[in-house]
Image (spheres, rainbow, N blue to C red):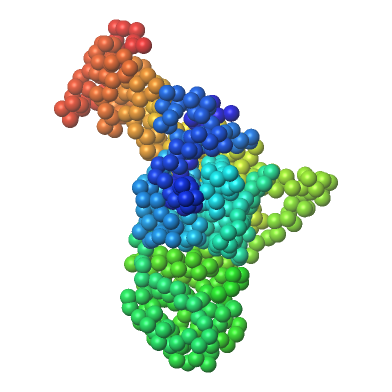
Amino acid sequence: MCSDSRDCRRVKVLYTGGTIGMLRNEEGVLTPVPNEFERKLRRNPQMHDAEFAQKLFGDSAEMAPLVLPEVHGMKRITYSFHEYEFLLDSSNMTMEDWALIANDVHQIYELYDGFVILHGTDTLPYTASALSFMFENLGKTIIITGSMIPIFDVRSDGIDNFLSALILAGNYIIPEVSVYFNYRLYRGNRTVKVSSNRFDAFDSPNFPPLATVGHKIEVDYREIYRPCTIEKFRVQSNLNSHVGLLRIFPSIPTQTVKSFLQPPLEGAVLQTYGAGNVPSNRSDLIEVFREATDRGVIIINCTQCSKGAVSDIYETGKTLYDANVTPGCDMTPEAALTKLAYVLSKTEWDVETKRVMMKSNIRGELTGEKPPQLQEWDLIDSVARSLHLSSHDVEQLDSILFPAMLCSAVQNSDITKLTELKGYGANMSSTNSDLRTPLHIASAMGNLEIVRYLLVNGASIHMRDRNEITPLLDAINGEHEEVIKVLKQCGAHLTLSPKEIGEKLCSAAMYGQVKRLKSYKLAGANLSQGDVSGRTALHMAIMCNQTEAVNYLILSGVDTTVKDKLGFSAIDLAKHMQLSPIVELLSSNKDGKPELLRSGSRVSNGTNGHS
């Protein structure tokens, strides 16, 4: 049960338009009505628990985030709703709109655990594909969903799609842009629209679902594409719009193709027959392609078939490769086009680098060559047979065996064992019974080498254990400054509320834990943040006569004018406690020339302190 906001997961909903939020007018025609969606959601008991919201937010509940009803075994979801000023039919979606969505997510990225984007269905695969490339080093769950029938109609798929997307975004870390529809979560850049009227309107022809929702939610963690760099989340919002799609058909005029490939076009997706074939007896057509690639136009060969990939096994396909046309493997046309717009926007890459990137797997959008892996189930079956386990026990062994072995390898600083387990298919973000990951343990130990290894092998920095502790908090509590720096470099951030941070800082100051204060500062904490009583770390350091902490806080530039709820500033408190050296220090700090207290000294006073 979510007893306070810390026990909840925060999700941001971006409503761009589409069928899901439309209402029927007097003529029965579907139309978007500004600001009506959220108002109706607050009245829907399936989408908002008004009674619990009142307990959680008090008198401000009507203006506070919405709260989902409790779901057994899941964290309670609170979600904030942002409706764009101009609601769009998805047919009107443009690259500028993609950039707006991407920048909005980037701006509030650290404030939420996950994101849900409500979108019309017609161009949804284009938006999902584009955002998957624009979001670099993504570490949180972003789900795009919509519906075929408005959510407020009696017979709608919108409720299930929206509810499930919120639950997945808040409770699971799936660091991809994904599409949720009809009980399945698909990788966004693998998704295509396959029906104009069925609830199962989307499919992922060349890649399995990332998750399926039924009586249980089953996530295929091995298929999740994870960032494997030590870099922060960022957005590439300036796409190159000089791209296009060209579908080959019998007797296609050469002049049509030639005109299409003229400047300002810089990249084209060529949809060809079967396994990537074009008429090999059309030398005029092949010459047009060769002329275009010679002047730097990047042409990507994708199949017109919904399943399968392009290949050069036929003469009619090899002809294109000889003309320097780049194979698109099994990319969808939507993914190929948006990836092309993304790659062409990288001005720091030359043309050859861009061609290499187009046929490389950078977001899970195509099936590249996989490194050889050991058979995971060979290991599990061997253990199961030796222990004479039942088939039910074997199903659970995967989630028990690998986390235990990974955590043991981390504790022993055994990178060789970690590499072997990865070869068996172990998920580096798998959790033990306390929901702690290998990265939690390595961060708590301060083992920088193991932390780096885990990060470049896909470990998530945002996982929380049973006590809501992240790897960053583990590193702070262990005062491991180098680990904190690496985690921050990778995009880790504090998940505590401002008041909770204030309490932690005051506690550290009370005991003179200067290194702990430094750790919080490295992690991005504001050392002037107050606790529930308004006291800051400086207040507490003065009250407890911790001179080293006072010196450090002054040198760190904390705000010395902050007053607690009793109206005392730091200097007021020092005067009240008759701590003359601290009063002098604070006074000199106002002049910009603080005269620090002698290290280790205790300042005498004549009072019992301030309470």
Q: Left of 582 or right of it: where is 313?
A: right
Labels in figure, total: 0
One can see residue 563 in this view: yes
Q: Left of 100 or right of it: where is 317?
A: right
Residue farthest along the right direction in this orientation: 388
Residue farthest along the front direction in this orientation: 27
* Horizontal and vertical percent position of residue 413: 57, 46
**Is 593 in front, or is 160?**
160
Residue 545 lies in quadrant: top left
Q: Residue at x 41, y 27 (%)?
A: 60
Locate the C terminus by quadrant.
top left
**Is 522 in front, or is 244?**
244
Q: Residue at x 42, y 23 (%)?
A: 59
Q: Left of 333 or right of it: where is 405?
A: right
**Is 24 in front, or is 422?**
24
Instruction: Judge whether 266 appears above or below 143 on screen.
Output: below
* Horizontal and vertical percent position of residue 304: 55, 75
* Horizontal and vertical percent position of residue 607: 31, 7
Q: Residue at x 55, y 45 (%)?
A: 153
Instruction: Judge whether 88 appears above or below 77 on screen.
Output: below
* Horizontal and vertical percent position of residue 213: 64, 48
One can see residue 442 in this view: no
Residue 534 lies in quadrant: top left
**Is 185 in front, or is 254?**
254
Locate the N terminus by quadrant.
top right
Instruction: Judge whether 433 appears above or below 310 on screen.
Output: above
Q: Residue at x 42, y 72 (%)?
A: 244
Instruction: Judge whether 524 appears above or below 144 on screen.
Output: above
